Image (cartoon, rainbow, N blue to C red):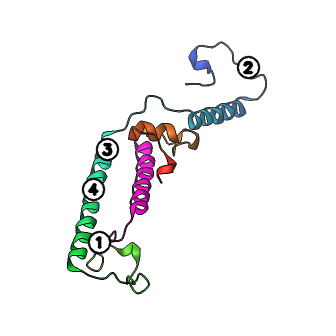
Amino acid sequence: DFSIPEKSEGFDAIRFEWQKEAPAKEYLRVKVLDKKRTSRIETLQPSQWFQEKWANFKKLFAEWQKKQDALAKNTKKAGKEEEDEEQRVLAGDIFSIEDVCDVQGEPLFKDFELADWALLQLRFELWLLQAAFTKDVNDPDRPSVPLAHFAFYYQRYYKRALNPKLF
């Protein structure tokens, strides 16, 4: 921790050569904040909260993919013809959906392809990384993952490198 010396710390006299006390304290505060925002936290480890959320998502993600596979097999067995996407219109607001497994009787992810699943996973991972970082650091001076250290924290939390080619 960096601080400006004070008389209460046992100094006989404190002289501010370049600036008065208030501007010197403000300058130091800004420098310390900048250092905090740009430095990695080497000792940061994913919390139990992160581990639980990540495990729950992986389980849910696998369930959704199984439901999609089962639906695709049932559709092929029944010999149904797929409707044109232009004819199929979902009624209502997409943000009002309460259960992604039941949107007008079908899962929202019924027609997902590999790219859709990858983007869903990436979006959740990014959200969870940001939320967990904020919780784990618990420092209002570090409101988010610094962009320069994003790959470091992604590796720290997910135990793998972020590979944009996969998305």
Number of residue marks: 4
Query: Residue visible at 42% across and 36% down?
Result: 156
Q: Nearer the viewer, mark 2 or mark 1?
A: 1
Pair 1/3: label in front: 1
Residue 9, x across and y down, in percent: 57, 17
**Circle 1 SS class:** loop
| SS label for mark 3 | helix
Q: Earlier in the sequence, mark 4 or mark 2?
A: 2
> From mark 2 to mark 1, how far is it between C-alphas?
71 Å
Q: Which residues are magenta?
A: 109-136
Disc 4 on helix, strand or loop?
A: helix
Residue bearing the label numbered 4: 62
Instruction: Give the residue number, with chain letter if any, for mark 2.
Output: 15
State yes or no: residue 127 in magenta: yes
Q: Which residue is mark 1?
A: 107
Q: Are marks 4 and 2 in contact (CB under 8 Å)?
A: no
Residue at 28 percent of width and 46 percent of height? 52
**Crowd band around label 3 with a 10 angstrom C-alpha radius: few (<14), some (14–19), many (20+):** few
Q: 64 above or below 79?
A: above
Q: Which residue is mark 3?
A: 49
Question: Image quarter for residue 121?
Answer: bottom left
Decide which of tag 2 and tag 1 comes sooner along the chain.
2
Task: Give the number of the mark in front: 4 or 2.
Answer: 4
Amino acid found under the numbered disc labelled 2: Arg
